Image: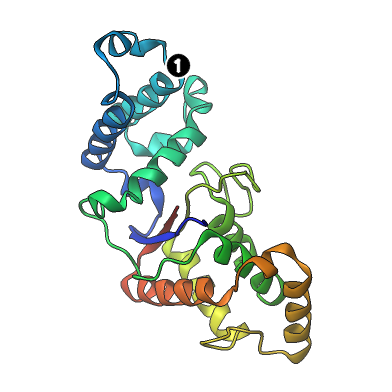
Amino acid sequence: MSAPVFIYLTPPDGLVPLLTPARLAAFRDWLWRENTEHLNAEDLADIESDEELMALLGLVDHLLQQGAESLSKPPTRHADAMLDLLDELSDYFTREELGIPEGMELATDLKPTDKQVRASDVVIGENCPKRTFELWRHLVWGRAPDRTVAEGIGLRRNFPSMGYWTAAEVRHVRDDLRQHLSGAPDYMPMNNWARFMTSLRLKLTRTGRAAAPAPAIEAISRAVDRAAREGAGLLFAR
């Protein structure tokens, strides 16, 4: 079953300002519980042998001490923990059994599946300008704070990670979707030739057969419209 993609509002600059000290501290507590509450006393005493967990906790402690801004250029000793941290944050932001993390707000109640998001990449790549296609790749595959647009966190990872757009990038996407795609329910190209090529690619590609792209584009369209009105960025977690 394909994972749902949660779309959150963020401060204008995207992910980093979202990681306030209070939120990082709550995340650290959650991460510790997730990894230790099932352990017996003997295993808990040996928890420091879990190198991956210790590396993650070390990075979170570094961010608590130095500020989330240091996530953009983490010290070498913490660089290897970056992707693991983003994956764990993504889990934290999508923990439906505990509800939405305190102080966060969904940009839309629509939660397209990961397969639908990947399928939407075909439509955007065929019809929208390069700037939006490159941003869409961060929606599909993820983005780390130290990467510029079009530089992935390891594009085409087996498990796509968290991504984000700044407020300025949100406005680019909103404008391009309005200019180059029709509206609901199909979100197909305005240009007839582009419409034909998109339909052909969707039929020929595995992603096109696996899921319809329209639900993802509908969700993103609603999210960017709201974020643009409020001057916010967007975060994508699954």
Q: Is residue 153 placed above or below 139 in the rendered structure?
A: above
| Left or right of 14 on screen, residue 201 | right
Numbered disc total: 1
| Left or right of 181 on screen, residue 18 | left
Q: Residue at x 63, y 48 (%)?
A: 151
Q: Residue at x 25, y 42 (%)?
A: 23
| Left or right of 211 on screen, residue 72 | left
- Looking at the picture, which amino acid does disc 1 mark? Glu
* Viewer-proximal residue among 64 and 238: 238
Among the 4 quarters of the image, the one containing residue 68 = top left
* Viewer-proximal residue among 47 and 59: 47
Q: Secondary structure at mark 1?
A: helix
Q: Residues within 10 Å of mark 1 (few under 14, many from 20)?
A: few
Q: Residue at x 33, y 27 (%)?
A: 35
**Residue 42's spot in the image, x, y percent?**
29, 8
Q: Is residue 194 placed above or below 130 in the rendered structure?
A: below
Q: List the residue tagged with mark 1.
A: 51
Evaluate whether residue 129 shows in this view: no
Evaluate whether residue 6 shows in this view: yes
**Residue 9's spot in the image, x, y percent?**
34, 62
| Left or right of 45 on screen, residue 164 | right
**Residue 224's spot in the image, x, y percent?**
43, 72
**Residue 50's spot in the image, x, y percent?**
42, 16
The figure's colour scheme reads rainbow
Among the 4 quarters of the image, the one containing residue 103 = bottom left
Q: Is residue 98 placed above or below 61 in the rendered structure?
A: below
